[in-house]
Image (cartoon, rainbow, N blue to C red):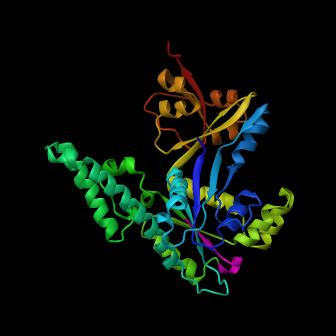
Amino acid sequence: MPLRCGLLGRPQCGKTTVFNAITAAHASMFDAAEAHRATVAIPDGRVQQLVDLYAPAKITPSTMDLVDIPGLEEGATAEGGRGSKLLTHIKEADMLIHVVRCFENGHDPIAAIHDVELIDLELMAADAQTLERKIERICKRARIGDKLIIQESEACQRVLDRLHEGIPARRQDLTDVERAAVFECTLMSLKPVLYVANVSSSQDMDSDAVEALRAFAAAEGSEVVPICGRDEADISELPKEDQAEFLSELGLQELSVERLIHAAYNELGLVDFFTAGPTEVHVWTCRSGCKAPAAAGKIHTDMERGFIRMEVIAYDDLIEHGSEDAVAKAGKLRLEGKEYEIRDGDIVVIRFSPPR
């Protein structure tokens, strides 16, 4: 499954411009009531190195699905049909990319933290309704003395009380019991957030508004990626060979999509591993700490069920020695069992017994 990210923010924050900078999708900024969708390949320089070594017939990179969710006004999540549609987009996302206006627009002063808090209030209001419905649903079972249901109800109530105090779920330091109790609710204010500080020029990457946003994000363990959305949207439309020159003029090393993806991977604790050969070079994504059988299951469920062992070559070892045979002769090919935790850059072969 691709990494699913929901791009949200207040109207006029430059969200669709940032969407175009990331995706080069040429989405219109004049149909603000509609969500835009795009799938982008996740840039990874290691893929080309593997292609050079294996000359595969097929290349399958990791991808990211990005949804540009219409701008959230105050009370938007309570607006009948439209509100429900917005909530669906947010609930389906693995993480939220919150675009924050950190530039002058000629009308309203920059108020980065105020804008962030308004969005949080909308998400918390919707989450509170979801929790209230769950508590009401299970309260009858709690009355008959079911201890587990009583514990679940009390845990939901604690999370709800803190939402009413204005504390998003992701800032509540939820216990394991509380997380389990609210799991089915898919709380939007619990989703990991990556903040994009949308600035007017590369000289504003460390402006007061950006620094204030960084301090706010640090308090919840989130990251901030400053982007000049307007400039990068223009650059994304250029041929690849011309992009580096324009990035250099802006004092940047990489496009926003690369910086965002690196930050998103860090936020979600993701790693990439590879299967590689003359047939295909394929990038697979899993959580850091994922055990070998579960990683094999990303390739095919039969591989997880019938897992025997995993043959592993580290990417750096393959590049250093130049071939799988040379890696094996150097003693760098490893055989790993069911308790092995996949590492970023692993190149793997799965040995398994097909289930009968």
The N terminus is located in which quarter?
Answer: top right
For the residue pair 23 and 67, the one nearer the viewer reads as 67
Q: Which residues are magenta?
A: 195-204
Q: Furthest residue to the top?
A: 356
Residue at the image point whose x is 22% and y is 45% from the top:
149
For the residue pair 213 and 165, the one nearer the viewer reads as 165
Above/below status of 222 relative to 213: above
Residue at the image point whose x is 46% and y is 57% from the top:
191
Q: Position of residue 108 (x, y in %)?
A: 60, 86
Above/below status of 177 relative to 342: below
For the residue pair 214 and 92, the one nearer the viewer reads as 92
Say whether residue 159 is visible: yes
Q: Position of residue 24 (x, y in %)?
A: 76, 58
Decide whether residue 112 is among the magenta residues.
Answer: no
Q: Position of residue 210 (x, y in %)?
A: 57, 77
Residue at the image point whose x is 50% and y is 61% from the top:
80
Residue at the image point whose x is 46% and y is 34% from the top:
340
Decide whether residue 196 is among the magenta residues.
Answer: yes
The tally of labels here is 0
Q: Left or right: where does residue 319 sit relative to residue 97? A: right
Q: Left or right: where does residue 62 sit relative to residue 81? A: right
Say whether residue 255 is visible: no
Q: Furthest residue to the left?
A: 145
Res 9 → quadrant: bottom right
